[in-house]
């Protein structure tokens, strides 16, 4: 599926590090492993049905006043406005496992048509979500999945495979197709980081990447100073290093900061996963040529359209069903009711000023 660069509304944002941690340390995940298969019942999709106007669509993020969540739900509001629905935002001030339950119960009483939820716990919200489904409310999990047996679909940012492939692709481009590369990750037991690195290792074994050599994988523990020191150590230990790949927003920023002030600037490339606001200065001073991340506003936008498609009968949540999500185009529901937003967006000097998060 093609992915177009998209503008997002300016968002006040001062806690870049908090966003980065949220984006790359825990929110990217495959569907929750618990629970059974998505139950779409005996409903039959009518792909030709028109989107209903006046739908009441509520968003329940992990917590309110979280910079990353704020951007996500801003996309949801944009979608609801486009389809002439009624947007509602509710949520707890903390991200504890059961903090969302009372809000779901209230949304049931208010007879919402759709609840979009980024679950703090895949199972704690299930009894309430199933009560909502019994009342005819469609459930769209986004960003962080609920158990499969208590939601209709899940909007996933990107697949583990897609992220790992993109990291290797950027490394290859920056290295000119050959040479030594290294990975600066978060913690040694970070599930998503390790999954991306596993995909990278597989990609590096392919013939087209035969001339790339991974010489080290080190861990900055998502600590700025330790990541800075690890980057320094990599360059001292491996004088022929051409690219450092850091799939963590803390690591890539610390690495870029070290390289930008060292004699390695212009000789060693830095890439990975970061936020535009965090990396802007390093792109503009040419330390970083390109890096990647998904657009969180698009996650909410896609969730809004998926909810409207469910409530209008265009889809039921079954694998293979398709629907159109406004400016994002057409999407197909995958196994387990999962809808993947698309590959990460690549940021570089040409487009970074179009993004503000």
Image (tube, rainbow, N blue to C red):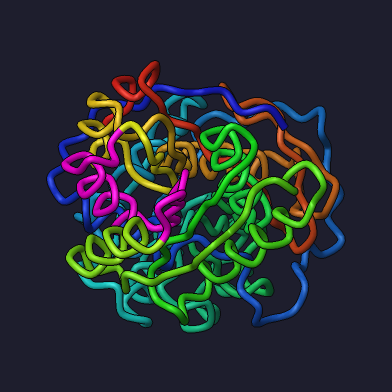
**Quadrant for the N terminus in the image:** top right
On screen, residue 93 versus residue 106, left or right, reads: left
Q: Residue at x 23, y 26 (%)?
A: 285
Residue 277 higher or lower than 29, as above or below: above
Residue 14 higher or lower than 234, as above or below: above
Furthest residue to the left?
14
Instruction: State the image coordinates of residue 17 (x, y, percent, origin top left).
Output: 22, 55
Instruction: State the image coordinates of residue 114 (x, y, percent, origin top left).
Output: 53, 51
Q: Is residue 255 magenta?
A: yes
Question: Is residue 165 or residue 1 the one in the foreground?
Answer: 165
Residue 161 visible in the displayed image: yes
**Quadrant for the C terminus in the image:** top left
Residue 345 higher or lower than 354, as above or below: below
Tell me which segment is drawn in magenta: 238-265
On screen, residue 145 versus residue 338, left or right, reads: left
Question: Is residue 257 or residue 347 the one in the foreground?
Answer: 257
Residue 357 visible in the displayed image: no
Q: Residue at x 67, y 39 (%)?
A: 312
């Amino acid at each position: 599926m093609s992915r177009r660069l998209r503008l997002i509304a300016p968002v006040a944002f001062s806690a870049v590090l908090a966003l980065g941690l949220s984006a790359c340390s825990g929110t990217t995940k495959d569907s929750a492993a618990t629970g059974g298969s998505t139950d779409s019942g005996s409903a039959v999709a009518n792909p030709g049905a028109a989107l209903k106007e006046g739908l009441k669509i509520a968003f329940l993020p992990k917590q309110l006043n979280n910079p990353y969540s704020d951007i996500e739900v801003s996309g949801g509001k944009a979608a609801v406005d486009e389809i002439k629905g009624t947007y509602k935002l509710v949520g707890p001030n903390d991200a504890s496992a059961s903090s969302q339950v009372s809000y779901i119960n209230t949304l049931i009483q208010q007879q919402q048509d759709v609840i979009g939820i980024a679950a703090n716990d895949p199972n704690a919200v299930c009894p309430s979500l199933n009560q909502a489904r019994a009342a005819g409310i469609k459930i769209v999990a986004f960003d962080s999945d609920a158990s499969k047996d208590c939601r209709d679909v899940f909007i996933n940012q990107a697949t583990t495979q897609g992220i790992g492939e993109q990291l290797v692709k950027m490394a290859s481009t920056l290295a000119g197709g050959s040479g030594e590369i290294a990975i600066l990750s978060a913690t040694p037991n970070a599930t998503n980081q390790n999954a991306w690195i596993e995909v990278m290792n597989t990609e590096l074994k392919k013939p087209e990447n035969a001339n790339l050599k991974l010489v080290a994988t080190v861990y900055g523990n998502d600590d700025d100073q330790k990541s800075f020191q690890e980057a320094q150590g990599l360059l001292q230990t491996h004088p022929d290093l051409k690219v450092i790949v850091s799939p963590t927003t803390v690591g890539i920023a610390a690495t870029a900061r070290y390289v930008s002030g060292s004699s390695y600037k212009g000789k060693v490339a830095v890439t990975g996963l970061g936020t535009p606001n965090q990396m802007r200065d390093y792109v503009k001073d040419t330390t970083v040529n390109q890096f990647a991340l998904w657009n969180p506003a698009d996650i909410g936008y896609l969730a809004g359209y998926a909810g409207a498609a469910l409530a209008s009968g265009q889809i039921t949540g079954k694998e293979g069903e398709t629907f159109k999500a406004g400016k994002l185009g057409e999407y197909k529901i995958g196994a387990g009711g999962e809808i993947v937003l698309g590959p990460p967006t690549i940021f570089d000097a040409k487009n970074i000023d179009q993004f503000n998060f």
